[in-house]
Amino acid sequence: VKLTKLLSDGRQQIVGLQFAPEFIGKVFSEKVPVSVEAATDVEICVFPKAELENMLKQQPEFEHRLLEQTLVQLDDARTWMVTLGRKTAQEKVASFLLLLADHIGKPSPAAPTSIEFMLPLKRADIADFLGLTLETVSRQMTKLRKMGAIDIRKNLDVTVHDIDRLTAISGGD
């Protein structure tokens, strides 16, 4: 799912992505400052607030797991701030592809050292998420393909041939 923030002038900014089996929402808050939108088909399990709070009281390990997920997301957000603030366009696109490979990638049946996944976002959404133009994202994907780091079929299916090489291109994160 993509997390978006609506600006006062109507513009929207994608501020995060969440992947299965992550928890979405704020347990102890009435309001959430972002909107949640499915980027692909999803199944969601919804807990009423009172039930969730009761589960947390009864199962401290569940509360610990939610805290751990929150801290991981905080670390990820700090890393992503560096990506958006300091990296080149090519490094941003490579970092985005690494993020997807890590969360939704699966070994390729044709080449077990390769990782495959389907892009869950349209190029315009990728551009929004990375703070780039649509044209820049497309150019950088083409460059990565020509470098042999990735293959893209039907503008959706991505194969990462060498995760270490893509990591190096991303600036080493």
Image: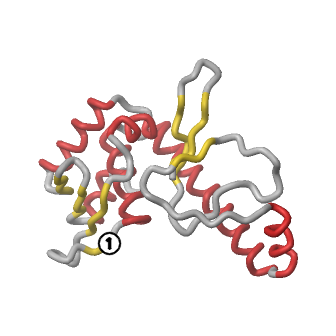
Q: Nearer the viewer, residue 95 or 118?
A: 118
Q: Nearer the viewer, residue 44 or 162?
A: 44
Residue 65 on image: x %, y % = 69, 74
Q: Amino acid at mark 1?
A: Lys
Q: Residues within 10 Å of mark 1 (few under 14, many from 20)?
A: some
Q: At numbered mark 1, what does the secondary structure look like: helix, strand or loop?
A: strand
Q: Nearer the viewer, residue 111 or 27?
A: 27
Residue 11 on image: x %, y % = 54, 24
- Tell me where residue 40 sits by quadrant: bottom left
Residue ID at (18%, 50%): 154
Give the residue number, with chain letter if any, for mark 1: 106
Task: Give the left or right position of residue 37, taking residue 39 as reference.
Answer: right
Q: Count the labels in the image.
A: 1
Residue 72 on image: x %, y % = 62, 63
- Tell me where residue 100 sits by quadrant: bottom left
Residue ID at (87%, 75%): 57
Residue ID at (42%, 57%): 99
Colour mode?
secondary structure
Residue 98 on image: x %, y % = 37, 58
Residue ID at (50%, 51%): 38
Residue 52 against residue 112 in the figure, above or below: above
Quarter placement of the C terminus? bottom left
Q: Nearer the viewer, residue 151 or 11?
A: 11
